[in-house]
Image: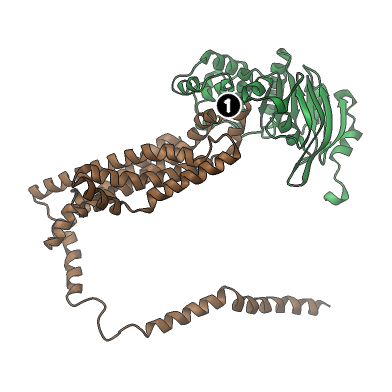
Amino acid sequence: MLVLDRVGKSYQGNLALAPLSLEVEQGERVAVLGPSGSGKTTLLHLIGGVVQPDQGTIALEGNLLANMSSGRELASLVGIMHQQLDLVPHLAVVHNILAGRLGHWSLWRSLASLVSAREKHLAQSALERVGIPEKLNERTSHLSGGEQQRVAMARLLVQQSKVVLADEPIASLDPARAEDLMQLLTTIVSESNKTLLASLHSIDLTRKFFSRAIGLRNGELQFDLPVDKLTNEVLYRLYNLTETQV
Amino acid sequence: MRSSIASTTLQRPRYRTQDSFFRGRGLLTLLLGVALIWSLTSVNWTGSIVHPGGLSAIGEFFKAAFTPELSGSFLGLTLGSAWTTVAYAVAGICLAVLLGFPLGVLASGVLAKSAGRRVAQVAGFRIVLGFLRAIHELVWAWLFVVALGLSPMAAILALAIPYGGILGRIYADILNDVPQEPLRALRSSGASEWKVLLYGRLPMALPDMLSYSFYRFECAIRAAAIMGFVGIGGLGMQIQLSLGDLFYNEVWTLLYALIGLVLLVDVWSTWLRRSLTQ
């Protein structure tokens, strides 16, 4: 499904991700763990086509990411949600959700939809799915952080990509809401047998909702294990501060 | 041991201030101060700065502020002139927005397909915008009066061209400065740069663009009034006529009308901006 072959990335000479190879099957739920600045976001951005690798190749369903000509093709394969800030606060919720359809719509249809929403039923049912159906016509900036994450999820639902990438989707939420949201995300993903890669900092939630975990540290892959093999010792080595970092 | 630490910490700042005083701003301040004192010697202190009778004229002018001309016929004239000025300003700013918006989008380079094209496009359209706003509206007014005669079109075009340049420049900057994260998310859901403009940049930029356009509308009212001085009509022309006749009471009536107009636009724009950003 998803194959990374010696993919590496640096920013202005600073290593963000050392060459890394990885294979993920359809329907797998992979947690990406590691301290801040370890390359988690870089990895997700590379898979999502947000940044281009310096070396190596990424293939989705056998198609090389580098060869995909249109954003539309990529969008049907990969969808991405971030920690926050990735909705347009000035638009109504319905338009932020339907933004997931922009890859399919013509420019004129996109413009017309801003005046009078097209395929509104898609947005409505996606919003029902994430549990806040009454917010359809509200201005997005009026929603709480947790509700905005639900809207971002609804957008991924209408985008209907086969792989879902989530970059610290719960980082700004309190523990109860974080677990709720993770539950929702993993349920939605498994219902349609999508593949999920999510970076997060909670070991408990990793054990509860994911099937596999990879650990990154200083841009290097430290481990790649099924979650039941995730021992405290492995985790200690991943997060442990070395002398030089203190 | 302790005393030596104390003495070094005491001494070090003193050296540092002395050092930087003669190298940095201190020296410049000293030089400018000397230059100022020296320049005072070249002022002719025996003559007067204000010409004879000037002071009393200023006095009369400000005294008239308390007794503006309030006769019915003059108020009617003021109202008519104010209407002309507002009409010029509205028409001028509307044309300026129509001109500035597409130029601003192009000069922001957000629709360019490649980095190379973006550089060329941004440079090219910024030069165009720079040319439009480099020439003051009064100069344009003078040129258009020569070309078109004393027609309202001269005033409107004279406003629209430099204001279009200014608005275009500001629109381009605002469109470039919106938060990038939502745009990145739109791109990853398959949106082209045109759609990113429609769904991301414009909605996020609109409140700022609108608020700046209103500020420019305020300026346009003042400019439209001033343009009367070249004879196109409106408050400015009446101010010039009354000033020429030394009817300061009438001048003040007209000035109050101008102040009232600017305040009105301010209130309106505040209200509109609030309803947009909520």
Note whether A107 is above or below B183 in the view shown. Answer: above
Of the 4 image quadrants, the one containing the N terminus of chain A is top right
Residue designated by label 1 = B191
Q: What kind of element bears circle 1?
A: loop
x, y (%) of residue A21? 84, 29
Count all numbered tags in the image, as a single digit. Answer: 1
Q: Is residue B86 visible?
A: no
- Chain with colour green in the figure: A
Asked whether, in this view, residue A148 is left or right of residue A138, the answer is right
Q: Is residue A68 visible?
A: yes
x, y (%) of residue B229? 21, 55
x, y (%) of residue A148? 59, 28
The answer to which quarter of the image holds residue A232 is top right
Check the rendered structure and report the hue given to chain B: brown
| Residue type at tag 1 | Ala
Note whether A204 is above or below B18 in the view shown. Answer: above
